[in-house]
Amino acid sequence: MADSWILEEMRTVDLKDARLNCRLNEVLTQLSKHSAASIPAACGGHAEMTAAYRLFDNQNATFERILKPHSDATNNRIATQNTVLLAQDTTEIDVTRPSKQVHGAGPLAGPTRRGLFLHVLHAFTPNGTPLGTLHTKQWTRADGKSTKSLSRAQRAATPIEQKESHRWLNTLRKAQDVAHNCSNTRIICLCDSEADIYELLSESCQVDWIIRGCQNRALQRKKGDATTSHIHDSLLAQPVLYSQTINIRGRKIKIACDTRGRRQARQSRQACVEVRSSCVSLRPPYRHDRKLPETTVNVVLVREISPPKNEEPVEWLLLTSMPVGNITQVREIIEFYSVRWMIEIFFRVLKSGCRVEERRFENINRLQSCLAVYMIIAWRTLYVCRLAREYPDKDCEVIFNSAEWKSAWKVVYRNDPPPKPPTLSKMTLMVAQLGGYIKRKDSPPGPQTIWCGLRRIHDFALCWDVFGPDVKSDKKDV
């Protein structure tokens, strides 16, 4: 029997066969309860395992059809919000195998690694609660195809429609469709520096956007000025709006030969940053096949003052369509962009919590169908983690059933559960404690302890339903 949240989430599922729809709900229920386990272990039996693999092999159970009901439910959740942030980003699904490779997988960043690329448009509230995936694009590269083999002139001569980077522009247009369908919700699209593309900046759209800049773009020349100014110098010439002290998390260098400043190792520290803003007119770059229009964008610069010796200063250059007329508006832009990091956490849950890269399939199409199922599970895991922060005093039964919270209470506190369900905040804390979380005042539970705790909760709830005090005995008095 499928869980109630799955029946609601998959209400509009249509795999062209009612029996296949039911099977998807059952498989989703089984895998969600044991997200890190192998598919045979999660299904719990040979018949159930066979049914799951047959589902992923069915030509009607495509990635798009499996994910569509979740996208429909996401649109419904967006319509209830005043403001929603749509973050888009790309990740690699690495399925490299030591001997026989997955059929249909292509090269990733290097020729020795195999897999596919996944570009996702995911919705979040301003507090970081995930609402779900709205749009995706998956693709594999052909063997021998690499943009590194092309000269800079050859890359510049390639129309954007033929480049992988066109996905950023296409996904922004999908965000406009969301805004059209949810006309009472304010929509802001968030993109990392890979989306710093002039065609995207000059796109006429109905949604606001915030993009982290990575290019020191040239500005339009003023009359009588023979020199060319650039966006970075223009921002540094602006007065400081305000200063703020922030905590910077340390990191290790991933690739030893990478010389880019943003990829270097750094120590955790507190840093004082200055914030500036301006409105600038960008000079359009040359394109061999079209003339790009002039465009004006607002810019916010967040830059560290006096970084430690041999450390790169922390810097955010945020390009946006949102107004920057006062400090309140600038603060809002920075706070909104900070939520973009949640899509990185979503990818981490998908890969580490659901272990999607470790699924053993011979064909990439079957892997994609499985990937769609685990994307729904990853969203649900992160949703449980974040919802308690946004609505801590809500009744926990908005997410958990009675067997789940009662069994968790009995295991954690070693006494009988109360007649009234605990709050969502208290229940989430119990789940995290079962996943290894150590209670601290200044450190709320993260997704890792939540997904570990949820796996245990499902087992406890099953025992509660079978052996708990609410089960009526079938034994007759002798």
Image: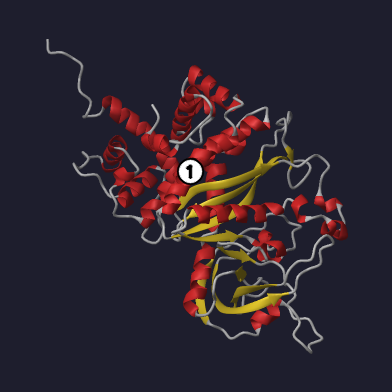
* Farthest residue, direction left: 478
> Residue 158's spot in the image, x, y percent?
82, 55
Which residue matches tag 1?
72
> Residue 11's spot in the image, x, y percent?
43, 36
The answer to which quarter of the image holds residue 452 is top left
> Residue 17's spot in the image, x, y percent?
51, 24
The residue depicted at 49 percent of the width and 29 percent of the height is 24
Above or below, comparing residue 179 to residue 304 in the picture:
above
- Kind of residue at disc 1: Asp
Q: Nearer the viewer, residue 35 or 307?
A: 35
The residue depicted at 29 percent of the width and 54 percent of the height is 393
From this viewpoint, is residue 378 visible? no
Label 1 secondary element: helix
The answer to which quarter of the image holds residue 297 is bottom right
Q: Nearer the viewer, residue 294 or 243?
A: 294
- Density class for disc 1 (Cα within 10 Å; few <14, some 14-19, many ≥20) is some
Q: Quadrant of the N terminus?
A: top left
Above or below, comparing residue 77 to residue 457 in the picture:
below
> Residue 329's spot in the image, x, y percent?
49, 74
Above or below, comparing residue 198 to residue 452 in the picture:
below
* Farthest residue, direction top: 478
Horizontally, residue 298 falls left or right of residue 448, namely right
Horizontally, residue 468 falls left or right of residue 364, namely left
Above or below, comparing residue 248 to residue 478 in the picture:
below
